[in-house]
Amino acid sequence: MILSRTKQRAPELTPPARMTEAELIEACRRQDRRAQKELYDRYNRAMYTACYRICGDFDLANDALQEGFLKVFQKLHTFRGESTVGAWMKVVIVRTALNRLRRQPRYDELPLNHADEEVDWGHTALDVEYLEKAIQRLPDGYRAVFVLIEVEGYKHQEVADMLGITVGTSKSQLFYAKKKLREYLKAYV
């Protein structure tokens, strides 16, 4: 009796670039390096932007981004799918950037006499690049609070919890950040 030998094909795998978010997450959980690279490629620009806005330094932002993605891959098993993976990753990476920033000089406690006042930005359209440069000139504490609240949309209590400061300090940092930005942009507005 002669046995016929038929070649069995390995099941065809979907390339990571064509995987759905759920498939990509599962592949990353299995430590599939191609899937991990794809997840990184899909999200690194947005995550870097958040890191840079918080840290205000290219090298520090790059370090925070790399450390953040390592944490994402290590903790991906805890992702429950209650939000998008991008939103979940952003929390992990923003916290990593904040921790990096926290290792820098500490936040100053500022008086609260004007913390709840609004700053009038005027009605002139600002050049985005000029505004970004002005934000980067802010002291670390001002910049972190400003970016988290005004750009990323966090509430004062969330920022206070993330940074280990009081809600009052968060409010005063935001007030003085806006005041400082107003000074920087005075000639432009």
Image (cartoon, grey):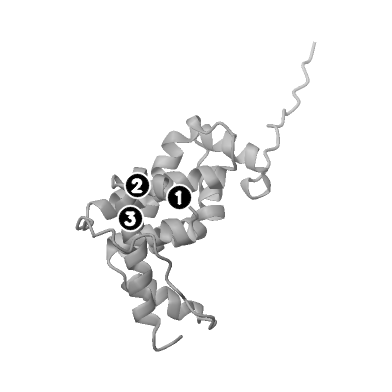
Q: CA distance from mark 3 to mark 2?
A: 23 Å
Residue ID at (27%, 67%): 139
| Marks 3 and 2 close (CB-CB < 8 Å) | no
| Label 3 or label 2, whichever comes before in sequence order | 3
Give the class, few, some or many, for how many residues have Cα within 10 Å of label 2's Cα (few <14, many ≥20).
some
The disc label shown at residue 63, or none: 3
Location of mark 1 (residue): 155
- Where residue 132 appears, x then y in whole percent? 43, 73
Location of mark 2 (residue): 160
| Marks 1 and 3 close (CB-CB < 8 Å) | no
**Of 60 and 12, the residue lying toward us:** 60
Give the class, few, some or many, for how many residues have Cα within 10 Å of label 1's Cα (few <14, many ≥20).
some
The disc label shown at residue 169, or none: none
Report the amino acid beneath label 1. Answer: Lys
| Label 1 or label 2, whichever comes before in sequence order | 1
Q: Relative to 146, say whether 79 is above or below.
A: above
Report the amino acid beneath label 3. Answer: Asp
- Quadrant holding the N terminus: top right
Report the amino acid beneath label 2. Answer: Ala
Q: CA distance from mark 1 to mark 2?
A: 9 Å
- Residue 144 occupies which quadrant of the picture? bottom left
